[in-house]
Image: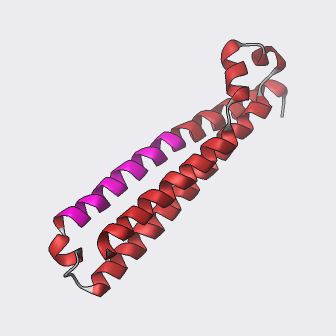
Amino acid sequence: MNSERTQDHGIFWAAMRQRDLLVGFAIFVAANVLLLGIVVLGQGTLGHDGSHDAKVAFAVIAVALNLLIWLWNDAGIKDVAASNKDLEDDDRQLAIAQEFLKAPWAFYRAIVLIVTVLVAGSLVYAVFW
């Protein structure tokens, strides 16, 4: 494969993974708002006086859903971070590329993990306690 074609493929994959991150974030927010709505609206079913089986089912869904979304977003961040290795030498001189190269990718991945665990944990906590 020639260099120009390789560069075009790299740009395509980087752009696609960036869109994946936006979609993953939107799904994370929408799914957890819906789960929170179930907790709030379903207090009689899931609340302190609710069925233990319903609580367990809710907890499994909340944890599994957040785990899958975290895997999606973590892989997206990892791939976007890898795209900095594909920058051409001329592009590395651009101010925007310099900022991109300095981005704290490991920190972003850690924050996404922490937020996901806290959100899933708070949903489970809200149902059981």
The reply to whether the magenta stretch includes residue 87 is: no
Quarter of the image with the N terminus is top right
Please identify the dominant SS of the magenta region. Answer: helix
Q: Is residue 90 visible?
A: yes
Q: Residue at x 49, y 52 (%)?
A: 115
Query: Where is residue 65 shown, x and y percent of the image?
Result: 44, 64
For the point 80% across and 22% down, the residue is 88
Considering only vertical position in the picture, is 91 above or below 110?
above
- Taking the spot 52% from the left edge, 63% from the top edge, the residue there is 67
| Residue at the image point whose x is 39% and y is 71% from the top | 61
User: Which segment is the magenta one?
Assistant: 21-40
Confirm whether residue 6 shows in the render.
no
- The quarter of the rendered structure image containing the C terminus is bottom left
| Foreground of the two, 48 or 46 | 48
Q: Position of residue 34 (x, y in %)?
A: 28, 57
Residue sitting nearer the eye, 56 or 82: 56
Corner quadrant of residue 77: top right
On screen, 129 above or below 14? below
On the image, the x and y values in percent for residue 73 come to 55, 50
Would residue 27 be counted in the magenta stretch? yes
How many marks do you count on the picture?
A: 0
Specify the color scheme: secondary structure
Placement of 108 over or under 97, stated as above or below: below
Task: Looking at the picture, tell me which residue is in the foreground, 49 or 104.
Answer: 49
